[in-house]
Image (spheres, rainbow, N blue to C red):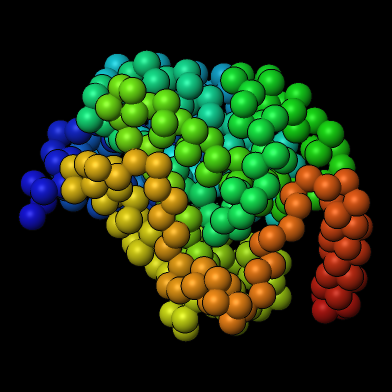
Amino acid sequence: MKEYFGYKDKVCVVTGASSGMGKATVNTLVDLGAKVYALDMNPCEVEGITEYIKCNLANKEEIDKAFEKIPEQIDSFFGVAGLSGSKTDYRTTFDCNYTANMYMTLNYLKKRMPKGSAIVFCTSTAGLEWKRFKKEQNKVVHAKTWEEVQEATKKLANSAPATFAYMYSKRCLSQFACEQAVEFAKFGIRVNNVLPASTDTGMKQEFQDMVGSEEGLIEQAGLAGRLATSEEMAYPMVFLNSNMASFISGLDMVVDYTDTCLKVLKLKKNIEAISATNPIICAMAKKMMSKNSKVKALNSGEENK
Ligand SMILES: NC(=O)c1ccc[n+]([C@@H]2O[C@H](COP(=O)([O-])OP(=O)(O)OC[C@H]3O[C@@H](n4cnc5c(N)ncnc54)[C@H](O)[C@@H]3O)[C@@H](O)[C@H]2O)c1
């Protein structure tokens, strides 16, 4: 069965390799005989990887240094690392989630991946509405350098809450993958996205704090009645980059156990259908979030008494 996937001795680069879905991806690839280069700012403790490379993806120079350590030929790329925006600022969140993936794709993957290779990005169901908001994303997605993306997001970085960077970066990444799938097809390289629903990973508590409870998170995981496991997101990513998916490119694989169906059938409200860049919405959201965090600080102060 393992041969069907075609990972034996293939050079696979995985970002966000030290926790959650990235770590589960690394575990699976090692089991399938791949040579795994694990990129993360925290140590990757999976036995059997070829090399752990410490890298802060929100920093262009660190990405350049990391790619010096990776073999010239890259067969498979998994862009999994991400930040929710609840503990980091807008700039760091956006750069880790979007700019880093754009930069690695255009500066390294385009030059170093052979025909038959594949790229998968881990976006999010939070970015599901990217087709509806293409106009908002065009400026960023059509920027070709790190600096141009910084310029295109400068205003937002100063005015919108960091959690809005999450939705916007995931929408931009989905659109970028779609456009690059067309571009990379010329070279016989496939590009796809996996859009996970709520998953039990290192990021769970941050999302739980945003929605208020674990039940709230479970509600965003369709009719499963539970959160997904990291493996349930890693397997679709491993499948999409494998020989088993050789005719699949440009796909948004939504892994949400019917959540999208519920919205299409109008059995559930689509809360993702809002602008991520409208100045009035951003200002209101920023105000609301700072009020919430003040209330939280007050409450925790009282609890600590
Ligand atoms: N957990 C969910 O409910 C959920 C839902 C939809 C999408 N996602 C996406 O799944 C992906 C994987 O996240 P996860 O849920 O496994 O969370 P996680 O926190 O368990 O893993 C994220 C990994 O990314 C690494 N990372 C974060 N910022 C980095 C940076 N600047 N440089 C290098 N490494 C960095 C972390 O060290 C960690 O190992 C993310 O892109 C996330 O946005 C998660």
Please determine whether, in this image, residue 200 is positioned above or below residue 185.
Answer: below
Which quadrant does the C terminus fall into?
A: bottom right
Residue 9 x/y as whole percent: 15, 34
- 59 versus 178 height, above or below: above
Residue at 53% across / 44% down in the picture? 174
Give coordinates of residue 219: x percent, y percent. 57, 78
Identify which residue is drawn at 70% across, 39% down.
Answer: 135
What residue is rendered at 59% in x and 48% in y? 131
Say whether residue 169 is visible. Answer: no
> Is residue 207 visible in the rendered structure shown here?
yes
Quadrant location of the N terminus? Answer: bottom left
Position in image of residue 187 (x %, y %): 31, 22
| Residue 109 appears left or right of 91 | left
29 and 134: which one is in front? Answer: 134
Query: Looking at the picture, does residue 255 appear above or below residue 103?
Result: below
Seen from the viewer's position, the closer of residues 153 and 41 is 153
- Residue at 34% across, 28% down: 185
Residue 50, quarter of picture:
top left
* Image coordinates for residue 154, horizontal then vertical, percent: 80, 30
Q: Is residue 24 left or right of residue 79?
A: left
Tell how many labels: 0
- Nearest the viewer among 77 and 248 is 248
Residue in front for this viewpoint, 16 or 189: 189
| Image-based side of 305 in relation to 104, left or right | right
